[in-house]
Image (cartoon, grey):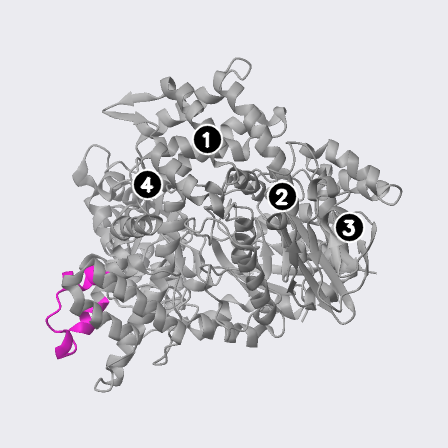
Amino acid sequence: MRIPVSTYRIQFRQEYDFAAATAIVPYLAALGISDLYASPIFKARAGSSHGYDVVDPTQLNPELGDREAFDALVSAIQQHQMGWLQDIVPNHMAYDSQNLWLMDVLENGSDSDSFDYFDIDWNHIYEEIRERVLAPLLGNLYSDCIENGEIKLAYDETGLSVNYYSLRLPVRIESYARFITYNLGQLTKALGRRHPDFVKLLGILYLLKNLPAEAKGRERYDQVAFVKGLLWELHEQNEAVKELIAANVQSFNGEVGSPESFNLLDSLLNEQFYRLSFWKVGAEEINYRRFFTVNELISVRVEELKVFHKTHSLIAQLVEDGIFTGVRIDHIDGLYNPVEYLERLREKIGDVYITVEKILELTESLPTGWQVQGTSGYEFLNYVNGLFCDANNEPAFDRFYTTFTGVASSYDRLSAEKKWLIIEKNLAGDVENLAQRLKRIAGQTRSGGDFTAYGLKRALSEILALFPIYRTYITSDAVSETDRQVIQTTIAAAKKQVPLLQRELEYIEAILLRNNEDYLTDEQKADRLHFVMRMQQLTGPLMAKGIEDTLLYGYNRLLSLNEVGGNPSHFGILPEQFHTFNQQKVDHWLHSMNTTSTHDTKRGEDVRARLNVLSEIPDAWAEQVKQWADINFSKKERLGGRTIPDRNDEYFLYQTLVGSFPFDEAEFPAFVERLKDYLIKAVREAKVHTAWLRPDSEYENEFIAFAEKLLDAPETNEFLAQFRPFQAMIAEYGILNSLSQVLLKNAAPGVPDLYQGDEFWNLSFVDPDNRRPIDYQQRMAVLDQLKTKLPHNPLALIDDLFETRATGNIKLFLTYQLLQARKAFANLFQQGDYQPLEVAGDLQNHIIAFARTVGGQAAIAIAPRFFTPLVQPGERPLGTAVWKDTHLILPSGLPSTWTNVITTQLLQSQNTIAIGDALQHFPVALLVSS
């Protein structure tokens, strides 16, 4: 198995294709990257900006280039002895006209070869979507869309289709008879009954009305194709037939202003295997599983063996060909049976590196039986980030946040509230479906017979709202102790919230824990297990939407903690927690990924590094915010009894500005526009004053106007005059935090992952802002300069880098030096153990240090933190003048001669290392035994 030394994530899209990636491969190799880490490259919907909306996983995405361009990229990677880690999407595909498997289902229903490819409930309780699949893809009410002439019938060589702007859906063959027979008398008059073409048309009608029900598979497809071909042949050969079809299309499409004229089209649509609806319907009534709440992404039944093999055929081929050397699995928690999937994947692709996108709570562990090398690294991100948040100042932040914003609820209470909001608004249909399944199970036995649908749904919803992790992994009658504890703890909490539903909660608990099943039939046991596994597929999306996509935009105590996989109620990580985490990682998931930014993170890694500085200076921060609020009070708008923005959104904005304000003045105009786009997304995600489902344009417009006033006329702006000196100070300390973060990512156990462009400062907002184009020419030029200057006078180079630190060159330098060390000492960093090092002296709390050893080789990482009491802004925290008596106490057996691979300086140790000596020239140190 090839284990990456390091990975570099690239976000492919039409504007950044295979050829563009090929051009930077030499740069990545020179930087020290061992493996390209690619976003999905399989055929996606036209214009996809991310690749997760796959329409055909058996093809490469033609928008990224042809096979020749792909092969050129493969050749470049292999010439540089690099690997390819590929992001794959087993959970879902695009609900789109280009998804031919889905279109086949919509045209042929249960006769489709793809009928069981998608996670659709064909026997839904609601009659209007029974034996049909909801298509909640309209921008307005169905009645408005059809009567406004936006839904149109069309005919071409492929047959009849229903069209709504770019959406094109097929028409089932059985509906052709209704279409052809309309106004057929006109054709009779034009041609006469004995005309050969009229006779042919009657023959087509006969075939349509007598398609044998027993015809299946290829036989049925051949018959349908034959009928369509005959009709098109008549259309092309006989002008009267062409005119009839054109006239019928026009008649079915109705006349705007005459509602009854659309009855023909409405009747035809009611016959289809799909029901078009307003997109908001999907939140409350749904009969297919989606990716989270995205109607345009329909889930795949990858648990079906034929679907698994079909969707993974190209992946397996590219692994077999030696092109893919590893895979990253997107949204593993969405799958019906993740354990079974991983076993099948391992069998199919063999002994290659596999990592999963998995969100773990602070004390949660990845199931040890999974056949993977680890996760994509969100837990590492949150542990490292928490190190730079000063836990001692949590009470001060609590007081000021509550005082300034009025938000007094605890994080746990807000968490439940926001998940309830999603249950009632965004996932109401999914929860209803699960509750109906539970009601049917309750009706199977005497013990559940008296439970009402309302009571069961209320109890179930309470459990879902209080569920503390993404999901459990129950797949049989065996329940792990970890899953058992989660369920029992959640049920106990739910009983406190709804004590009148204790019996319902206990009934659900017994089902989840697979208890009291001895007297059940095998079918009833299977029903219960299916319910459990369905519920497990829902808790993750609820957590993601309720917490990551709602609460993390509304609970704004310290935004650096509001990150994917994070829990903002944990104000900081203690060094011993970080060390324990890494020791457990060595024991179980040595090759899990270490990330600090991804395409999904809420803000760039260097934004978090800046904001963490605020945790060190709560009083100064509070004073600044109060001053800014006073200055900006007159800029707020007062409408309808409310002040816009409210104090919580205002506090969010101030932190956002502090964290993301650009170093370069030239970037300021673009920054303002980016900020405005981001703020709209943020307030909609928060779902307090506005939301995607119910936009409040008044609040949004006034919030944007407020932000514009804060940033308008920079030369004379009173707020900016107050803001910029403070922000510049935070940015200086943020640079030091960032450098420590880079060191920890590269020296700790695991595979360091670098997000595209992050070798420079990453001050991005959430997506799509974090997918902006990267200037690789600039990065290449800087790396070339560094490589030229470094061998001659590294200390002079470091001095120059500090003088120009705002450019980000210093971050690229550190990244380069660390990646070169990882390549040179690959066995040490890939297989080495992890030993926390004791720090002594006055400033011991300011140092994170650990050793990695394997065989006779050793390395020591030294990462400082909490810089504000150590140096003035812009000063370097170097030497004994800063670090005084602070030193490391080394365990016995470590070498005594070290090389600092960052500065190339030699260092001697005798049971201790003075921090001032190790950090004599650079703020962080990586010492490798000589």
Q: Residue furthest top?
A: 716
Label 2: how many Cα within 10 Å (few below 14, some 14–19, many 20+): many
Residue occupied by mark 2: 738
Cα separation between marks 3 and 2: 22 Å
- Nearest to N terminus: mark 3 or mark 2: 3
Q: Amino acid at mark 3?
A: Ala
Q: Which numbered disc, 4 or 1, marks the residue closer to the eye?
A: 1
Label 3: how many Cα within 10 Å (few below 14, some 14–19, many 20+): some
Q: Nearer the viewer, residue 400 or 201?
A: 400
Image location of residue 233, percent across then percent down:
41, 54
Cα separation between marks 3 and 1: 39 Å
Q: Amino acid at mark 1?
A: Tyr
Q: Amino acid at mark 2?
A: Ser
- In the rendered image, which quarter is residue 248 located in? top left
- Nearest to N terminus: mark 2 or mark 4: 4
Q: Residue furthest left?
A: 450
Residue occupied by mark 3: 30
Q: Which numbered disc, 3 or 2, marks the residue closer to the eye?
A: 2
- In the rendered image, which quarter is residue 642 located in? top left
Are the residues tagged 3 and 1 within 8 Å (C-beta)?
no
Tell me the element at label 4.
loop
- Nearest to N terminus: mark 2 or mark 1: 1
Tell me the element at label 3.
helix
Residue occupied by mark 1: 654
Q: Residue at x 35, y 45 (%)?
A: 163
Residue 211 drawn in magenta: no
Q: Is residue 382 above or below residue 580?
A: above
The magenta region covers 437-460
Q: Which numbered disc, 3 or 1, marks the residue closer to the eye?
A: 1
Tell me the element at label 2.
helix
Label 1: how many Cα within 10 Å (few below 14, some 14–19, many 20+): some
